[in-house]
Image (tube, coloured by chain):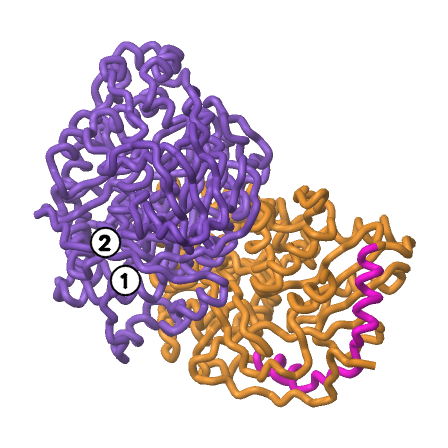
Amino acid sequence: MIIKLQDGICIDGTAKSEKKDLYLVDGVIHSKIDPTRKIDETYDVSNHIVMPGGIDLHTHIGGGKVNLARMFLPDLSRSSSTLFEQTVAPLSSPVPPAWETGLRYIQMGYTSCFEPAVLPANARQAHLEMADIPWLDTGGYLLLGNDRMLLRWIATHVPQAQITEYVGWMLKAHQCCGVKVVNAGGIDAFKFNQRKLDVDETHVGIPVTPRSVLACLAQAVEELGLPHPIHVHCSNLGIAGNIESTMKTLEAVEGRRIHLTHAQYHCYGNTGPHAFSSEAYQLAEYVNWNKHVTIDIGQVLFGQTVTLSADTMHQFANRKLAQPRKAIFQDLECQAGCGVVPFRYREDQYVHGLQWTIGLELCLRILDPTKVFLTTDHPNGGPFTAYPHLIRLLMSYDYRMSIFERLHPDVRATSPLPSLKREYTLEEIALMTRKGPATVLGLNDRGTLESGKLADVVVYRKADKIDSMFAQPELVFRRGALVMRSGVAVGPSQKSTIVAAAVSEMHCDSHFRKLWRQQYGYDVALTRISNEELLDEGRIIEYSQRTKNPSAR
Amino acid sequence: MEKLWSSQQKIIPPILDREMICSFCSLLCDDAIALDACPLRRDCLHKLSTIQPTGYVALEQIDELKKRIRSARSILMTGAITSVESARAAVAFARSQNAFLDFSPNGSVIDTIGALSSSGGYTTTLAEAREIAGSFLVVGNDELTRAFPRLMHSLSLSETATDARTVILLGEFSDHSLGVWTAKFPNTWFVPCDLEKIPQALSQWSILVSSPNSSEAKSIFDSLRCDYLTVVWSPGTLHSIPRDLWIEQLNQWILRNNETRRVVGLPLVSQDAVFAHTCTWLTSFPGRIQFEDKQARYLPTDDYRLWLDRYQQDEQSLVITIHESWSDPNPHLVRGLGSFRGTWIPMDSSERHQNRFHLPISIPGSHRTATMIRADQVVMARLDAFHKPDRGFRTPREWLEALSG
């Protein structure tokens, strides 16, 4: 099957943006083909912009806490009280069902999405849910920073090789592609009634510090050769003055690669009229000057949403801010936790307004768009359907100022946002939403329009109103097949589960089996997800690859 | 007449393989040796050995059923679904036929979810509770012990030795329950309490510890103040009380106690909770859904009884019951269907059916590989069949696809 996209403006941020023809040949992009070959379909895409499929590397789309939030909030279904300018039809709920997640993403031209917090005990459910999300390739990061067996090993200084082997085994057994650390050691400490755990503070139940956990896991990820660095949610999420622990977290990995997630929530100072201020400058400078770190934003949007996180320590503290006034929490299987707190961001509220500016500040201050990625930490900061709106905020100074003017007066008086006049280009947007995430995830088969890449391609009708343009592409292709035309689904597509390639296989000896049974009360066989099981669900398994050693040390 | 299915063979009781997971209750135990002592397992194995399905399902009948489905004024799908695979099939079928779904046979799962969504809560899981609970406060009645006979083993740190932690049985327990708990946890205390009044009683510790024996009262009081007190209960075993309010009050008590210390609930659900979970990720709602133009409308206070009342006399209405469980079908449902004038398509493994449209189904986790959820609603396990699945039984998914094809 050969499809020709004729005369489109091809933009991927890597090559020069220009009008040219593109060929989708048997699911793969070609810039040229043998002129004697028969073209099956031709689309005239002059006056259109052609981009690779979007990649969301941090979006809560499947697994226990996502489903718990759905169960917990039937009253928020069908509500659409989002205050940002909607160019995409609102979601039926802050946490929509699986099919709607797939539909809304593909309607915006996103083709690969990653669940950032897969609890090992719940990994099977996460994969089952993601199997029911149509059109998207999916993958997950495994929660390991509060695994009690691992914490005990770190506390007793077992050889790093044992930790590395265990991490590799866990990834393979639970079919994940990355390692997630949420409030390292803090979730477990909360089970022992410890209400705070700073980077160098010791867990009351097990003598480890977040620093030691981060260092061990970052080293394991390096030794395993995983393409994606440890994906870290820092110790003091949302707390005024947390920039200090965020910087300590970045130092804790000692130059090894780290991805700091929803960074907006982790760069607060404690100065100013409300003892809550922006320290985005400090974090942005660190990212600009250090190769070992990438971040995603976790931008907040005004309106109703629900926050869901493994970080029970901080979610429990935030329960008093819940709106509607209810919250639910779980301590989970000696591995992590879960807190679901509904939340409404208000533009007339000082802290919420400042959070909105901080997310944008980070994007505008970080110079390299392949180091900062567009996320709302869906649904925590707001729905993923806000991406077209966020892109417009980044590309238009006047537009963001028009919203800035509506914020709390103290935000307007203190935020440096008006001084940041940078406007993103389409090339930079392509890098931050396609090429950048593909690179940091080791997805070497996608993210650009180069020959040989997967033909996950999006065609946007060129428009002055950039959010409208990104809200509804004219055509979306997956593996070279048209799946969406003007927002209407025209065909299904093969889905893939992306897992880490070539992780070391721990020898599952009788000692380990015994330890596992002691910890969990069942055999390791119960937890392990085979390739056949994923294939039974109708999914292909793809491997993320690390092409070179990008150690930044 | 071409047969789609026929079987006269008796099913042979299985021998559990060492690595098999037992699917007879939602604890999903996988320790074969210890399981030999499980009374529930013994009963289920006996039941399995007596299943002897009879009858035929012919292609003509399927065609007739398809016609009836097409012409039905209203369709109800109900019963007990215990596997992800069947839940997916039931939701897809209901969506395509604009049917009403209610797979919470005694309402306990829906009530639990309803109570959680109104008041919130703080829960834990089996491994977590086993590892760090200071004491267990087991609230309920003997039905909890009967429904989860291996619970005390699952909560114990050691399979063979006794556990030094304290268990307080609060509610309406018999000497038998006290005995089985004491065998594993010698420090087991029984505090009788009217089941309905437990949440209020917990708010007034002093009532609980007003035993005339002061040292006993002190022990109980100390146990309730321990680190990580774990409150064990099961919504499915709460009958004849306003369950939703009871659960809400208990959850609020647990949440309040976490202001300064750690207290968690361990609600143990039955196997049919897997339907609620699967249905939620597919539709946003845990069940009791009316599909209209393929869109789900959540009707949490409507149930199958309301539907039956409305359509009892309507000959053009249709009910599909899917019963995937080892337990007996909901007697209220069976009674209600006794006088139903429309078409009833039962799917189950029972041999007792006289219904001409009976579609025999395999049992998940026994006859066929299936994905089920553990009682604490966190671990999903894939359970391999320990019977050859080629005995003529079909899965609900296969039948539903045949009916909608």
Which residue is painted at 43% across and 70% down in the image?
A: A532
> Where, by quadrant of the figure, is residue A376 drawn?
top left
Q: Position of residue B381 (x, y in %)?
A: 47, 67
Q: Mark 2 lies on which chain?
A: A
- Left or right of A286: which side holds A187? right
Whether residue A382 is situated above or below residue B157 in the rendered picture: above
Q: Where is residue B139 in the image (x, y as percent from the top left)?
A: 54, 58
Whether residue B203 is visible: no
Whether residue A523 is situated above or below residue A329 in the rendered picture: below
Q: Colour of chain B?
A: orange
Is A425 in front, or is A368?
A425
Q: Which residue lies furthest to the left in this view?
A: A553
Please give the range of residues in magenta.
B41-70
Whether residue A240 is situated above or below residue A260 in the rendered picture: above
Q: Mark 1 lies on which chain?
A: A
Is B200 in front, or is A129?
A129
Callout 2 amino acid: Pro
Q: Do labels 1 and 2 share a chain?
A: yes
Which residue is painted at 42% across and 38% down in the image?
A: A6
SS at mark 1 in the image: loop
Whether residue A40 is visible: yes
- The residue carrying mark 2 is A227
Is B72 in front, or is A207?
B72
- The residue carrying mark 1 is A501
Callout 1 amino acid: Ala
**Chain (purple):** A
